[in-house]
């Protein structure tokens, strides 16, 4: 399978509450280091002709403005949790300029949540200015968005099926604490892996830092970037200094090229 040259931008690297967390005065939340500011987790994937975003977080509008994303071809969803779908209403700005629906790719479970959360998008008599979307059903079969081939990677977030995605040499996994053999095989051979790591201590539905580190070592990935981090992870500089060079915390705005 041939892949175009891609630029990956981390739009956010925080967990559902973001960092800083409202009302918290821990050393991470009051840090002045920009790398300790973590919007909700999402990435932007761009080729020379196609731009797509993985998940529309509650910070979606600001993330698009910050990265000056004036054209968006598609949204691809990992799963239906609120911190990954809540910003979808703001695709209406792109509808306004393109005069066509936004292409949205999601599994049936996520589509069900989108239809419930954004019921006004699917009514017969829509209010003027309502977002326009075209739903595309995905599962575990590869699919194409523009010139970008995408291989879904099925993982588990406690009991919820979540889709990670492989783009050629790059694989993105968020909200997971279990990956089966088939998923592992789809990840193997990646040059870079993005993996969720909520905190240092074990969690019921997310990989911890030690678990993510062991998984990256087991898969023998040359470069692993950790995302979906809470303030409990610690300060960016301190944690990075404790990790091997091939495993590092991602930060908002970080760009990778493949």
Image (cartoon, rainbow, N blue to C red):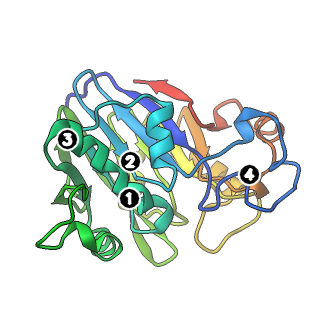
Q: Which residue is mark 3?
A: 145
Which of marks 3 and 4 precedes in the sequence? 4
Tell me: residue 163, above or below residue 144. Answer: below
Q: CA distance from mark 2 to mark 3?
A: 12 Å
Residue at image location 62% in from the left, 38% down from the top: 250
SS of the residue under disc 2: strand
Q: Quadrant of residue 49?
A: top left
Which of marks 4 and 1 precedes in the sequence? 4
Image quarter of the C terminus: top left
Nearer to us in this view, 93 or 172: 93
Q: Quadrant of residue 209?
A: bottom right
Q: Nearer the viewer, mark 4 or mark 3?
A: 4
Proximity of marks 1 and 2: CB atoms separated by less than 8 Å: yes
Question: Can residue 185 be seen from the camera position used here?
Answer: yes
Circle 3 residues within 10 Å: few <14, some 14–19, many ≥20: some
Q: CA distance from mark 1 to mark 2?
A: 7 Å
Q: Which residue is mark 4?
A: 20
Residue at image location 46% in from the left, 78% down from the top: 159
Q: Which residue is mark 2?
A: 54
Nearer to us in this view, 44 or 152: 44
Q: Which mark is residue 153?
A: none
């Amino acid at each position: 399978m041939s892949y175009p040259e891609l630029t990956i931008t981390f739009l956010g690297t925080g967990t559902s509450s973001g960092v800083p967390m409202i009302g918290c005065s821990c050393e991470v939340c009051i840090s002045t280091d920009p790398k300790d500011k973590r919007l909700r987790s999402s990435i932007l994937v761009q080729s020379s002709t196609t731009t797509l975003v993985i998940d529309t977080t509650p910070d979606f509008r600001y993330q698009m403005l910050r990265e000056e994303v004036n054209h968006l071809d598609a949204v691809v969803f990992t799963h239906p949790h609120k911190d990954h779908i809540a910003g979808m209403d703001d695709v209406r700005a792109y509808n306004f300029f393109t005069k066509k629906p936004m292409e949205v790719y999601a599994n049936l479970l996520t589509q069900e949540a989108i239809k419930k959360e954004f019921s006004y998008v699917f009514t017969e008599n829509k209010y003027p200015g309502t977002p326009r979307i075209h739903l595309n059903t995905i599962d575990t079969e590869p699919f194409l968005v523009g010139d970008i081939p995408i291989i879904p990677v099925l993982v588990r977030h406690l009991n919820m099926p979540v889709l990670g995605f492989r783009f050629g040499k790059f694989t993105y996994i968020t909200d997971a604490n279990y990956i089966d053999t088939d998923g592992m095989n789809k990840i193997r051979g990646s040059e870079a892996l993005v993996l969720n790591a909520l905190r240092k201590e074990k969690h019921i539905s997310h990989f911890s830092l030690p678990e993510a580190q062991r998984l990256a070592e087991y898969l023998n990935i040359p470069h692993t970037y950790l995302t979906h981090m809470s303030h409990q992870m610690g300060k960016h500089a301190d944690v990075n200094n404790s990790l091997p060079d091939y495993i590092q915390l991602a930060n908002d705005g970080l760009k990778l090229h493949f």
